[in-house]
Image (tube, rainbow, N blue to C red):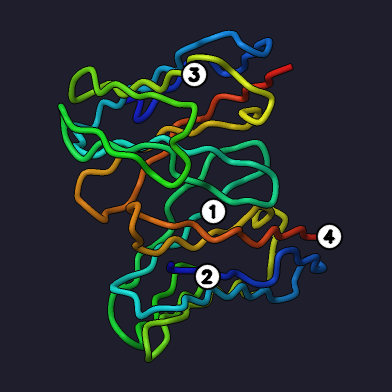
């Protein structure tokens, strides 16, 4: 069956450092979504990527969809304490969307 | 505009007890979902409903039943709770098939 792997599982960074999380699929994807979940909160939709090689920016966040549409990345420039949380990718699967296991980001002030 | 609401926020059950988790959305969405989230496991789909009157099993449906009462409401029932069902349960909705999902605040369930 389809598998989606997200790495790293955890990342601790100093405030101001950059952060990147990667999502890799075993199959070609029609699209990919990214969500953020603050500690104790619920997932919140960030973005959906559809086109091969697509790059989208939201302030300090840059999202990229691979040329082969099998992987994606989320990059945060100059992290802030407000970036703390878990970042999930979600890909279309048999049961609607399959969520990756997430990357938990901790930002040290 | 409340979005997606869930009740209760917290619940403690004894093994074998039953309960229903309630979910409602006010965004006129067709699709609704129930997920469970366990530490290190991400979100796993329990059941979903693509439209009023239809429900389908997700990845982990055993031990659960659902009802799509109307377009707004989608409930999840545990008939005989087990400790393995200790988890955080999220309800979500989306307007289009494959569209962004809006999540409720979650129900934290402990089964002892």
Q: Position of residue A55 (x, y in %)?
A: 39, 82
Q: Residue at x 57, y 70 (%)?
A: A5
Q: Nearer the viewer, mark 2 or mark 1?
A: 1
- C-alpha distance separating marks 2 and 3: 40 Å
Q: Which quadrant: the N terminus of chain B?
A: top left
Q: Is residue B25 left or right of residue A36?
A: left
Q: Which mark is residue A61?
A: 2
Tag 1 residue: A36
Within 10 Å of disc 1 (Cα), the crowding (few <14, some 14-19, many 20+) is many
- C-alpha distance separating marks 3 and 4: 40 Å
Q: Nearer the viewer, mark 2 or mark 3?
A: 3
Tag 3 residue: B78
Instruction: Please tell me which residue lies in front, A95 or A69.
Output: A95
Q: Position of residue A24 (x, y in %)?
A: 52, 77
Dot placed on the residue nearer the N-terminal end, 2 or 1: 1
Chain for disc number 4: A
Q: Residue at x 43, y 68 (%)?
A: A2
Dot placed on the residue nearer the N-terminal end, 2 or 4: 2
Q: Is residue A76 left or right of residue A66?
A: right
Q: Are marks 1 and 4 in contact (CB under 8 Å)?
A: no
SS class of the residue under badge 2?
Answer: strand
Instruction: Please tell me which residue lies in front, A63 or B39.
Output: B39
Within 10 Å of disc 3 (Cα), the crowding (few <14, some 14-19, many 20+) is some
Q: Is residue A78 left or right of residue A25?
A: right
Tag 4 residue: A108
- C-alpha distance separating marks 2 and 4: 18 Å
The answer to whether tags 1 and 3 share a subunit is no
């Amino acid at each position: 069956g389809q598998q989606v792997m997200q790495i790293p599982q955890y990342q601790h960074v100093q405030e101001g450092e950059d952060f990147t999380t990667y999502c890799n699929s075993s199959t070609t994807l029609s699209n990919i979504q990214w969500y953020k979940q603050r500690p104790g909160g619920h997932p919140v939709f960030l973005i959906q990527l559809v086109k091969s090689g697509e790059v989208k920016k939201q302030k300090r966040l840059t999202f990229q969809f691979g040329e082969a549409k099998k992987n994606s990345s989320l990059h945060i420039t100059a992290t802030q304490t407000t970036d703390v949380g878990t970042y999930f990718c979600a890909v279309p699967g048999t049961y609607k969307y399959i969520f990756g296991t997430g990357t938990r980001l901790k930002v040290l002030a | 505009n409340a979005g997606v609401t869930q009740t209760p926020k917290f619940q403690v059950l004894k093994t074998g007890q039953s309960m229903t988790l309630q979910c409602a959305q006010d965004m006129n969405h067709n699709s609704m979902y129930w997920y469970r989230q366990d530490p290190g496991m991400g979100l796993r789909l329990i059941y979903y409903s693509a439209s009023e009157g239809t429900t389908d099993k997700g990845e982990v449906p055993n031990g659960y039943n659902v009802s799509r009462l109307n377009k707004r409401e989608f409930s999840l029932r545990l008939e005989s709770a087990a400790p393995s069902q200790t988890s955080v349960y999220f309800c979500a909705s989306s307007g289009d098939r494959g569209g962004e999902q809006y999540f409720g605040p979650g129900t934290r369930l402990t089964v002892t």
